[in-house]
Image (cartoon, helix red, strand yellow):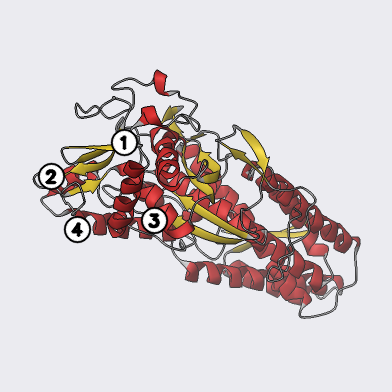
Amino acid sequence: MQSPFYAQNPVRTWVDDMLKVYNTLSRSKEEFEPLEGNHVRMYVCGPTVYDYPHIGNARSFAVFDTIRRYLEYSGYRVTYITNFTDVDDKMIDRANREGISVPELAAKFITEYRKIANELNLKPATINPRATEHIDDMIEMTELIIKNGLGYAVHGDVYFDVSEYESYGILSGISPDELSSGARVEVDSKKQDPRDFALWKAEKPGEPSWESPWGKGRPGWHAECSAMGKHFLGVPFDIHGGGQDLIFPHHENEIAQSAGAYGVETPVKYWLHNGFLTIDKDKMSKSEGNFFTAREVLDNFDHQAVRLFLVSGHYRQPLDYNTDALNQATQTVERIRNAVDTLRGRLLILERGQVDSTESDSILSEAIDTLREGFEREMNDDFNTPGALAELFTFIKVVNTHTSKISKPVVVRKALATMISLVNILGIDLSETSTGADKSESKELLKGTIELLLELREKARESKDWDTADMIRDQLGELGVTINDTKDGPTWKIK
Protein backbone atom coordinates (compact mmCIF):
# COMPACT_ATOMS: atom_id res chain seq x y z
CA MET A 1 0.00 0.00 0.00
CA GLN A 2 1.34 3.41 -0.94
CA SER A 3 1.44 5.98 1.86
CA PRO A 4 -1.73 8.06 1.48
CA PHE A 5 -1.77 11.79 0.99
CA TYR A 6 -3.19 13.40 4.12
CA ALA A 7 -5.05 16.54 3.14
CA GLN A 8 -4.75 18.19 6.57
CA ASN A 9 -0.95 17.91 6.46
CA PRO A 10 0.50 20.47 4.02
CA VAL A 11 3.91 18.78 3.75
CA ARG A 12 2.84 15.13 3.40
CA THR A 13 4.06 13.48 0.20
CA TRP A 14 3.65 10.19 -1.57
CA VAL A 15 6.33 7.67 -0.70
CA ASP A 16 7.10 4.59 -2.76
CA ASP A 17 8.55 2.68 0.19
CA MET A 18 5.91 0.89 2.18
CA LEU A 19 6.14 1.02 5.95
CA LYS A 20 7.83 -2.07 7.36
CA VAL A 21 7.81 -3.02 11.03
CA TYR A 22 9.74 -5.66 12.94
CA ASN A 23 7.22 -8.16 14.31
CA THR A 24 8.46 -10.01 17.38
CA LEU A 25 5.98 -12.77 16.56
CA SER A 26 7.58 -13.59 13.18
CA ARG A 27 11.06 -12.33 14.15
CA SER A 28 11.24 -10.42 10.88
CA LYS A 29 10.32 -7.13 9.24
CA GLU A 30 6.90 -7.21 7.63
CA GLU A 31 5.01 -4.80 5.41
CA PHE A 32 2.51 -2.95 7.55
CA GLU A 33 -1.12 -3.24 6.56
CA PRO A 34 -3.93 -2.69 9.08
CA LEU A 35 -6.61 -5.31 9.50
CA GLU A 36 -9.40 -2.85 8.71
CA GLY A 37 -8.73 -0.34 5.96
CA ASN A 38 -7.07 2.85 7.22
CA HIS A 39 -7.81 2.25 10.90
CA VAL A 40 -4.93 1.21 13.19
CA ARG A 41 -5.94 -0.28 16.55
CA MET A 42 -3.02 -0.08 18.95
CA TYR A 43 -2.57 -1.18 22.58
CA VAL A 44 0.52 -0.33 24.63
CA CYS A 45 1.12 -1.70 28.11
CA GLY A 46 1.00 1.19 30.54
CA PRO A 47 2.48 1.73 34.00
CA THR A 48 1.78 -0.15 37.19
CA VAL A 49 1.07 2.89 39.33
CA TYR A 50 2.79 1.87 42.55
CA ASP A 51 5.85 4.16 42.29
CA TYR A 52 7.42 6.99 40.32
CA PRO A 53 8.21 5.81 36.77
CA HIS A 54 11.93 5.53 36.08
CA ILE A 55 13.42 7.06 32.96
CA GLY A 56 13.54 3.61 31.34
CA ASN A 57 9.75 3.43 31.60
CA ALA A 58 9.62 6.86 29.98
CA ARG A 59 11.50 5.51 26.97
CA SER A 60 8.64 3.14 26.22
CA PHE A 61 6.15 6.00 26.62
CA ALA A 62 8.09 8.17 24.12
CA VAL A 63 8.83 5.38 21.63
CA PHE A 64 5.23 4.31 21.13
CA ASP A 65 3.99 7.89 21.11
CA THR A 66 6.43 8.51 18.23
CA ILE A 67 5.22 5.41 16.39
CA ARG A 68 1.64 6.57 16.82
CA ARG A 69 2.53 10.05 15.56
CA TYR A 70 4.18 8.66 12.43
CA LEU A 71 1.20 6.45 11.69
CA GLU A 72 -1.08 9.47 11.98
CA TYR A 73 1.28 11.56 9.83
CA SER A 74 1.08 8.78 7.25
CA GLY A 75 -2.67 9.21 7.10
CA TYR A 76 -3.87 6.40 9.34
CA ARG A 77 -6.61 6.82 11.92
CA VAL A 78 -5.18 5.47 15.17
CA THR A 79 -7.11 4.27 18.19
CA TYR A 80 -4.46 4.29 20.91
CA ILE A 81 -5.08 2.50 24.21
CA THR A 82 -2.64 2.47 27.12
CA ASN A 83 -3.74 1.20 30.51
CA PHE A 84 -3.10 1.86 34.17
CA THR A 85 -2.49 -1.25 36.26
CA ASP A 86 -4.07 -0.02 39.48
CA VAL A 87 -4.18 -3.27 41.44
CA ASP A 88 -1.49 -5.93 41.78
CA ASP A 89 0.92 -7.37 44.37
CA LYS A 90 3.35 -4.43 44.22
CA MET A 91 0.55 -1.92 44.71
CA ILE A 92 -0.90 -3.81 47.66
CA ASP A 93 2.53 -4.05 49.34
CA ARG A 94 3.29 -0.35 48.80
CA ALA A 95 -0.14 0.80 50.00
CA ASN A 96 0.18 -1.31 53.16
CA ARG A 97 3.63 0.15 53.87
CA GLU A 98 2.32 3.69 53.47
CA GLY A 99 -0.84 3.02 55.44
CA ILE A 100 -3.16 4.12 52.63
CA SER A 101 -5.64 2.35 50.38
CA VAL A 102 -4.69 0.94 46.99
CA PRO A 103 -7.02 3.44 45.20
CA GLU A 104 -5.31 6.32 47.05
CA LEU A 105 -1.92 5.04 45.97
CA ALA A 106 -3.12 4.67 42.38
CA ALA A 107 -4.51 8.21 42.30
CA LYS A 108 -1.19 9.61 43.53
CA PHE A 109 0.93 7.97 40.85
CA ILE A 110 -1.58 8.37 38.02
CA THR A 111 -1.34 12.11 38.68
CA GLU A 112 2.45 11.86 38.47
CA TYR A 113 2.27 9.86 35.24
CA ARG A 114 0.04 12.49 33.65
CA LYS A 115 2.49 15.23 34.65
CA ILE A 116 5.39 13.29 33.11
CA ALA A 117 3.32 12.61 29.98
CA ASN A 118 2.69 16.32 29.59
CA GLU A 119 6.36 17.22 30.06
CA LEU A 120 7.40 14.58 27.50
CA ASN A 121 4.77 15.92 25.10
CA LEU A 122 2.93 12.59 24.85
CA LYS A 123 -0.31 12.78 22.92
CA PRO A 124 -3.26 11.82 25.12
CA ALA A 125 -4.33 8.24 24.63
CA THR A 126 -7.70 7.63 23.03
CA ILE A 127 -8.55 5.92 26.32
CA ASN A 128 -6.54 5.27 29.50
CA PRO A 129 -8.49 2.37 31.06
CA ARG A 130 -7.83 1.24 34.62
CA ALA A 131 -7.69 -2.45 35.40
CA THR A 132 -10.18 -2.07 38.26
CA GLU A 133 -12.75 -0.66 35.81
CA HIS A 134 -12.76 -3.94 33.83
CA ILE A 135 -12.99 -6.68 36.44
CA ASP A 136 -16.17 -7.99 34.78
CA ASP A 137 -14.35 -8.29 31.44
CA MET A 138 -11.59 -10.33 33.10
CA ILE A 139 -14.09 -12.59 34.84
CA GLU A 140 -15.89 -13.17 31.54
CA MET A 141 -12.61 -13.99 29.79
CA THR A 142 -11.62 -16.42 32.56
CA GLU A 143 -14.98 -18.17 32.34
CA LEU A 144 -14.49 -18.65 28.59
CA ILE A 145 -11.00 -20.09 29.12
CA ILE A 146 -12.37 -22.63 31.62
CA LYS A 147 -15.29 -23.45 29.31
CA ASN A 148 -12.83 -24.09 26.47
CA GLY A 149 -10.84 -26.55 28.57
CA LEU A 150 -7.79 -24.37 29.11
CA GLY A 151 -8.31 -23.29 32.72
CA TYR A 152 -9.08 -24.80 36.13
CA ALA A 153 -10.08 -23.54 39.57
CA VAL A 154 -8.49 -24.59 42.87
CA HIS A 155 -9.87 -23.25 46.18
CA GLY A 156 -10.82 -19.87 44.74
CA ASP A 157 -7.77 -19.51 42.48
CA VAL A 158 -8.00 -20.00 38.71
CA TYR A 159 -5.06 -21.02 36.51
CA PHE A 160 -4.36 -21.28 32.81
CA ASP A 161 -3.40 -24.84 31.86
CA VAL A 162 -0.29 -24.41 29.71
CA SER A 163 -0.16 -28.14 28.91
CA GLU A 164 -3.45 -27.83 27.01
CA TYR A 165 -2.27 -24.94 24.81
CA GLU A 166 0.06 -26.24 22.10
CA SER A 167 1.17 -22.81 20.84
CA TYR A 168 2.56 -21.63 24.16
CA GLY A 169 5.97 -20.00 23.48
CA ILE A 170 5.03 -18.75 20.01
CA LEU A 171 6.08 -15.17 20.86
CA SER A 172 9.11 -15.70 23.08
CA GLY A 173 10.46 -18.83 21.47
CA ILE A 174 10.46 -20.52 24.87
CA SER A 175 8.86 -23.95 24.75
CA PRO A 176 6.76 -25.21 27.69
CA ASP A 177 9.29 -27.97 28.29
CA GLU A 178 12.03 -25.38 28.89
CA LEU A 179 10.09 -23.81 31.74
CA SER A 180 10.63 -24.92 35.29
CA SER A 181 9.48 -23.78 38.67
CA GLY A 182 11.16 -20.52 39.58
CA ALA A 183 12.26 -19.70 36.01
CA ARG A 184 10.13 -16.56 35.61
CA VAL A 185 7.00 -18.48 36.56
CA GLU A 186 4.96 -18.05 39.72
CA VAL A 187 5.71 -20.72 42.34
CA ASP A 188 2.42 -21.99 43.76
CA SER A 189 1.66 -25.41 45.20
CA LYS A 190 -1.95 -25.20 43.98
CA LYS A 191 -0.90 -25.40 40.36
CA GLN A 192 -1.22 -28.67 38.47
CA ASP A 193 1.99 -27.70 36.68
CA PRO A 194 4.56 -25.04 37.68
CA ARG A 195 4.28 -23.56 34.17
CA ASP A 196 0.62 -22.60 34.70
CA PHE A 197 -0.18 -18.96 35.52
CA ALA A 198 -2.89 -17.26 37.54
CA LEU A 199 -6.02 -15.89 35.90
CA TRP A 200 -7.78 -15.15 39.20
CA LYS A 201 -6.44 -15.00 42.76
CA ALA A 202 -8.52 -15.84 45.82
CA GLU A 203 -9.08 -13.12 48.40
CA LYS A 204 -6.45 -12.59 51.10
CA PRO A 205 -6.83 -10.48 54.26
CA GLY A 206 -6.17 -6.78 53.67
CA GLU A 207 -6.34 -7.00 49.88
CA PRO A 208 -8.89 -5.46 47.50
CA SER A 209 -11.34 -8.06 46.19
CA TRP A 210 -14.33 -8.50 43.91
CA GLU A 211 -17.09 -11.08 43.70
CA SER A 212 -16.60 -13.84 41.12
CA PRO A 213 -17.95 -17.32 40.30
CA TRP A 214 -14.97 -18.71 42.27
CA GLY A 215 -15.47 -16.54 45.34
CA LYS A 216 -14.09 -13.11 46.22
CA GLY A 217 -10.69 -12.28 44.79
CA ARG A 218 -8.85 -10.24 42.18
CA PRO A 219 -7.50 -10.83 38.67
CA GLY A 220 -4.04 -12.05 37.85
CA TRP A 221 -1.78 -9.42 36.32
CA HIS A 222 -1.68 -10.98 32.86
CA ALA A 223 -5.47 -11.03 32.54
CA GLU A 224 -6.04 -7.30 32.40
CA CYS A 225 -4.43 -6.41 29.05
CA SER A 226 -6.10 -9.29 27.20
CA ALA A 227 -9.51 -8.32 28.55
CA MET A 228 -9.13 -4.57 28.01
CA GLY A 229 -7.63 -5.04 24.55
CA LYS A 230 -10.66 -7.11 23.58
CA HIS A 231 -13.04 -4.60 25.18
CA PHE A 232 -11.73 -1.55 23.31
CA LEU A 233 -10.15 -2.94 20.15
CA GLY A 234 -11.73 -6.34 19.57
CA VAL A 235 -9.69 -9.38 18.50
CA PRO A 236 -7.61 -9.53 16.54
CA PHE A 237 -6.22 -5.98 16.55
CA ASP A 238 -3.21 -4.43 14.81
CA ILE A 239 -0.38 -3.48 17.18
CA HIS A 240 0.54 -4.43 20.73
CA GLY A 241 3.55 -2.63 22.18
CA GLY A 242 5.69 -2.69 25.28
CA GLY A 243 9.21 -3.19 26.60
CA GLN A 244 11.26 -6.26 25.73
CA ASP A 245 10.94 -7.44 29.33
CA LEU A 246 7.22 -7.99 28.70
CA ILE A 247 7.72 -10.54 25.90
CA PHE A 248 7.86 -13.29 28.50
CA PRO A 249 5.85 -14.04 30.46
CA HIS A 250 3.36 -11.17 30.15
CA HIS A 251 2.77 -10.97 26.41
CA GLU A 252 3.21 -14.70 25.95
CA ASN A 253 0.46 -15.21 28.49
CA GLU A 254 -1.71 -12.60 26.82
CA ILE A 255 -1.60 -14.56 23.56
CA ALA A 256 -2.51 -17.78 25.37
CA GLN A 257 -5.41 -16.14 27.23
CA SER A 258 -6.88 -14.37 24.21
CA ALA A 259 -6.53 -17.44 22.02
CA GLY A 260 -8.00 -19.64 24.73
CA ALA A 261 -10.96 -17.38 25.44
CA TYR A 262 -11.86 -15.88 22.08
CA GLY A 263 -10.84 -18.63 19.67
CA VAL A 264 -8.35 -16.62 17.63
CA GLU A 265 -5.00 -18.10 16.71
CA THR A 266 -3.23 -14.71 16.67
CA PRO A 267 -5.00 -12.04 18.74
CA VAL A 268 -2.53 -9.34 17.61
CA LYS A 269 -1.08 -8.95 14.10
CA TYR A 270 2.11 -7.01 14.98
CA TRP A 271 3.99 -7.24 18.28
CA LEU A 272 6.46 -4.36 18.79
CA HIS A 273 8.94 -4.20 21.67
CA ASN A 274 11.37 -1.45 22.63
CA GLY A 275 14.88 -2.11 23.94
CA PHE A 276 16.02 -1.36 27.46
CA LEU A 277 17.44 1.90 28.75
CA THR A 278 20.77 0.94 30.29
CA ILE A 279 23.31 2.42 32.70
CA ASP A 280 26.86 1.37 31.85
CA LYS A 281 25.33 -1.29 29.56
CA ASP A 282 23.27 -2.86 32.38
CA LYS A 283 19.48 -2.80 32.22
CA MET A 284 17.94 -0.01 34.26
CA SER A 285 15.84 -1.67 36.94
CA LYS A 286 14.22 -0.69 40.22
CA SER A 287 14.86 -4.16 41.60
CA GLU A 288 18.60 -3.69 40.97
CA GLY A 289 18.62 -0.13 42.31
CA ASN A 290 20.37 1.27 39.20
CA PHE A 291 17.82 3.77 37.97
CA PHE A 292 16.84 7.42 37.84
CA THR A 293 13.22 8.42 38.10
CA ALA A 294 11.70 10.30 35.20
CA ARG A 295 10.96 13.09 37.66
CA GLU A 296 14.65 13.47 38.60
CA VAL A 297 15.68 13.70 34.95
CA LEU A 298 12.89 16.04 33.85
CA ASP A 299 13.59 18.37 36.77
CA ASN A 300 17.21 18.77 35.68
CA PHE A 301 17.07 18.86 31.88
CA ASP A 302 15.11 20.61 29.15
CA HIS A 303 11.98 18.48 28.71
CA GLN A 304 12.28 18.45 24.94
CA ALA A 305 15.92 17.36 25.19
CA VAL A 306 14.83 14.43 27.35
CA ARG A 307 12.21 13.52 24.78
CA LEU A 308 14.77 13.72 21.97
CA PHE A 309 17.24 11.57 23.91
CA LEU A 310 14.62 8.87 24.47
CA VAL A 311 13.91 8.53 20.73
CA SER A 312 17.46 9.20 19.50
CA GLY A 313 18.37 5.51 19.25
CA HIS A 314 16.53 2.87 17.27
CA TYR A 315 13.64 1.78 19.45
CA ARG A 316 14.53 -1.94 19.37
CA GLN A 317 18.12 -1.36 20.48
CA PRO A 318 19.38 -0.61 24.00
CA LEU A 319 20.00 3.05 24.78
CA ASP A 320 22.62 3.97 27.39
CA TYR A 321 21.68 6.69 29.87
CA ASN A 322 24.34 9.21 30.86
CA THR A 323 24.64 12.92 31.50
CA ASP A 324 26.79 13.49 28.41
CA ALA A 325 24.07 12.05 26.19
CA LEU A 326 21.45 14.34 27.73
CA ASN A 327 23.71 17.36 27.41
CA GLN A 328 24.22 16.49 23.75
CA ALA A 329 20.46 16.15 23.30
CA THR A 330 20.05 19.61 24.87
CA GLN A 331 22.46 21.08 22.32
CA THR A 332 20.72 19.22 19.51
CA VAL A 333 17.31 20.60 20.45
CA GLU A 334 18.85 24.07 20.53
CA ARG A 335 20.24 23.51 17.02
CA ILE A 336 16.76 22.65 15.82
CA ARG A 337 15.23 25.66 17.55
CA ASN A 338 17.90 27.95 16.13
CA ALA A 339 17.27 26.68 12.60
CA VAL A 340 13.54 27.34 12.97
CA ASP A 341 14.27 30.79 14.42
CA THR A 342 16.60 31.52 11.48
CA LEU A 343 13.82 30.69 9.03
CA ARG A 344 11.28 32.75 10.98
CA GLY A 345 13.64 35.70 11.10
CA ARG A 346 14.21 35.55 7.35
CA LEU A 347 10.48 35.32 6.72
CA LEU A 348 9.98 38.43 8.84
CA ILE A 349 12.49 40.28 6.67
CA LEU A 350 11.02 39.07 3.38
CA GLU A 351 7.50 40.04 4.36
CA ARG A 352 8.71 43.64 4.81
CA GLY A 353 10.11 44.14 1.33
CA GLN A 354 11.15 42.69 -2.03
CA VAL A 355 14.49 40.88 -2.31
CA ASP A 356 16.06 39.80 -5.58
CA SER A 357 15.86 36.09 -6.45
CA THR A 358 18.99 34.03 -5.78
CA GLU A 359 20.31 30.53 -6.41
CA SER A 360 19.69 29.76 -2.73
CA ASP A 361 15.94 29.62 -3.37
CA SER A 362 16.26 26.53 -5.56
CA ILE A 363 18.89 24.97 -3.27
CA LEU A 364 16.59 25.24 -0.25
CA SER A 365 13.57 24.04 -2.25
CA GLU A 366 15.43 20.91 -3.33
CA ALA A 367 16.66 20.36 0.23
CA ILE A 368 13.07 20.47 1.51
CA ASP A 369 12.03 17.67 -0.84
CA THR A 370 15.14 15.68 0.00
CA LEU A 371 14.45 16.06 3.73
CA ARG A 372 10.86 14.96 3.46
CA GLU A 373 11.63 11.96 1.28
CA GLY A 374 14.62 10.90 3.37
CA PHE A 375 12.79 11.30 6.67
CA GLU A 376 9.88 9.19 5.45
CA ARG A 377 12.20 6.58 3.95
CA GLU A 378 13.97 6.13 7.29
CA MET A 379 10.78 6.06 9.35
CA ASN A 380 9.25 3.56 6.92
CA ASP A 381 12.15 1.26 7.80
CA ASP A 382 10.78 0.12 11.17
CA PHE A 383 10.62 3.66 12.59
CA ASN A 384 14.35 4.35 12.22
CA THR A 385 14.53 7.59 14.21
CA PRO A 386 18.36 7.87 14.11
CA GLY A 387 18.22 7.87 10.32
CA ALA A 388 15.36 10.38 10.34
CA LEU A 389 17.35 12.67 12.64
CA ALA A 390 20.36 12.44 10.34
CA GLU A 391 18.18 13.66 7.46
CA LEU A 392 16.98 16.54 9.61
CA PHE A 393 20.53 17.62 10.54
CA THR A 394 21.60 17.55 6.90
CA PHE A 395 18.74 19.92 6.15
CA ILE A 396 19.68 22.21 9.04
CA LYS A 397 23.14 22.67 7.48
CA VAL A 398 21.46 23.90 4.30
CA VAL A 399 19.23 26.23 6.34
CA ASN A 400 22.22 27.72 8.16
CA THR A 401 24.15 28.18 4.91
CA HIS A 402 21.47 29.57 2.60
CA THR A 403 18.60 31.13 4.55
CA SER A 404 20.16 34.61 4.69
CA LYS A 405 20.18 34.60 0.86
CA ILE A 406 16.63 33.33 0.30
CA SER A 407 14.37 35.75 -1.59
CA LYS A 408 11.03 33.95 -1.80
CA PRO A 409 8.78 33.88 1.30
CA VAL A 410 6.97 30.82 -0.07
CA VAL A 411 10.21 28.81 0.10
CA VAL A 412 10.82 29.83 3.70
CA ARG A 413 7.25 29.02 4.68
CA LYS A 414 7.53 25.57 3.09
CA ALA A 415 10.83 24.95 4.91
CA LEU A 416 9.29 25.99 8.22
CA ALA A 417 6.17 23.87 7.70
CA THR A 418 8.26 20.84 6.76
CA MET A 419 10.66 21.15 9.68
CA ILE A 420 7.95 21.71 12.27
CA SER A 421 5.83 18.85 10.90
CA LEU A 422 8.69 16.34 10.95
CA VAL A 423 10.06 17.43 14.32
CA ASN A 424 6.54 17.05 15.68
CA ILE A 425 6.58 13.36 14.68
CA LEU A 426 9.49 12.92 17.11
CA GLY A 427 7.42 14.64 19.78
CA ILE A 428 9.59 17.74 20.03
CA ASP A 429 7.53 20.80 20.92
CA LEU A 430 9.56 23.78 19.74
CA SER A 431 7.35 26.23 21.63
CA GLU A 432 8.16 24.62 25.00
CA THR A 433 11.21 24.88 27.21
CA SER A 434 11.77 23.83 30.82
CA THR A 435 10.79 27.32 31.91
CA GLY A 436 7.67 27.53 29.78
CA ALA A 437 6.37 28.74 26.45
CA ASP A 438 6.34 32.47 27.32
CA LYS A 439 10.12 32.61 27.43
CA SER A 440 10.34 30.71 24.15
CA GLU A 441 7.96 33.13 22.45
CA SER A 442 9.91 36.13 23.75
CA LYS A 443 13.14 34.58 22.48
CA GLU A 444 11.65 34.06 19.02
CA LEU A 445 10.47 37.66 18.89
CA LEU A 446 13.90 38.93 19.97
CA LYS A 447 15.70 36.88 17.31
CA GLY A 448 13.32 38.05 14.62
CA THR A 449 13.91 41.66 15.65
CA ILE A 450 17.68 41.19 15.60
CA GLU A 451 17.57 39.67 12.09
CA LEU A 452 15.46 42.58 10.86
CA LEU A 453 17.83 45.17 12.33
CA LEU A 454 20.83 43.41 10.80
CA GLU A 455 19.14 43.47 7.41
CA LEU A 456 18.54 47.22 7.75
CA ARG A 457 22.16 47.68 8.85
CA GLU A 458 23.42 45.83 5.78
CA LYS A 459 21.33 48.04 3.49
CA ALA A 460 22.72 51.11 5.25
CA ARG A 461 26.29 49.91 4.77
CA GLU A 462 25.67 49.16 1.10
CA SER A 463 24.53 52.78 0.60
CA LYS A 464 27.49 54.01 2.70
CA ASP A 465 25.14 55.37 5.38
CA TRP A 466 27.69 54.71 8.11
CA ASP A 467 25.89 56.76 10.78
CA THR A 468 22.78 54.57 10.54
CA ALA A 469 24.84 51.37 10.41
CA ASP A 470 26.79 52.41 13.51
CA MET A 471 23.60 53.40 15.33
CA ILE A 472 22.02 49.97 14.71
CA ARG A 473 25.23 48.26 15.84
CA ASP A 474 25.26 50.34 19.03
CA GLN A 475 21.57 49.68 19.73
CA LEU A 476 22.11 45.95 19.33
CA GLY A 477 25.11 46.21 21.62
CA GLU A 478 22.90 47.71 24.30
CA LEU A 479 20.68 44.64 23.95
CA GLY A 480 23.72 42.46 24.62
CA VAL A 481 24.11 41.43 20.96
CA THR A 482 27.64 41.10 19.58
CA ILE A 483 27.99 41.47 15.78
CA ASN A 484 30.80 39.89 13.78
CA ASP A 485 31.10 41.08 10.18
CA THR A 486 32.38 38.32 7.88
CA LYS A 487 32.84 37.96 4.11
CA ASP A 488 29.59 35.93 4.05
CA GLY A 489 27.67 38.56 5.99
CA PRO A 490 27.22 39.45 9.65
CA THR A 491 26.85 36.87 12.41
CA TRP A 492 25.68 37.60 15.90
CA LYS A 493 25.32 36.17 19.36
CA ILE A 494 23.80 37.25 22.62
CA LYS A 495 26.29 37.78 25.44
> Which of disc 1 and disc 2 is earlier in sequence?
2
Q: Residue at x 17, y 51 (%)?
A: 209
Q: Which quarter of the picture shows residue 13? A: bottom right
Q: Are marks 4 and 1 in contact (CB under 8 Å)?
A: no
Q: Which residue is mark 2?
A: 97
Asked if one can make out residue 47 in the rendered structure from this viewpoint, the answer is: no
> Which of disc 3 and disc 1 is earlier in sequence?
3
**Residue 273 appears at what percent x and percent y?**
51, 39
Residue type for callout 4: Glu
* Nearest to the observer: residue 305 or residue 442: 305
Nearest to the eye among marks 2 and 3: give it: 2
Q: Which residue is mark 1?
A: 286
In space, the residues marked 2 and 3 are separated at their CA atoms by: 25 Å
In space, the residues marked 4 and 3 are separated at their CA atoms by: 19 Å
Residue type for callout 3: Ile
In space, the residues marked 4 and 2 are separated at their CA atoms by: 13 Å
> Which of disc 3 and disc 2 is earlier in sequence?
2
- Circle 4: element type: helix
Residue type for callout 1: Lys
* Nearest to the observer: residue 296 or residue 341: 296
In the visual, does 96 lie left or right of 172? left
Q: Which residue is mark 4?
A: 104
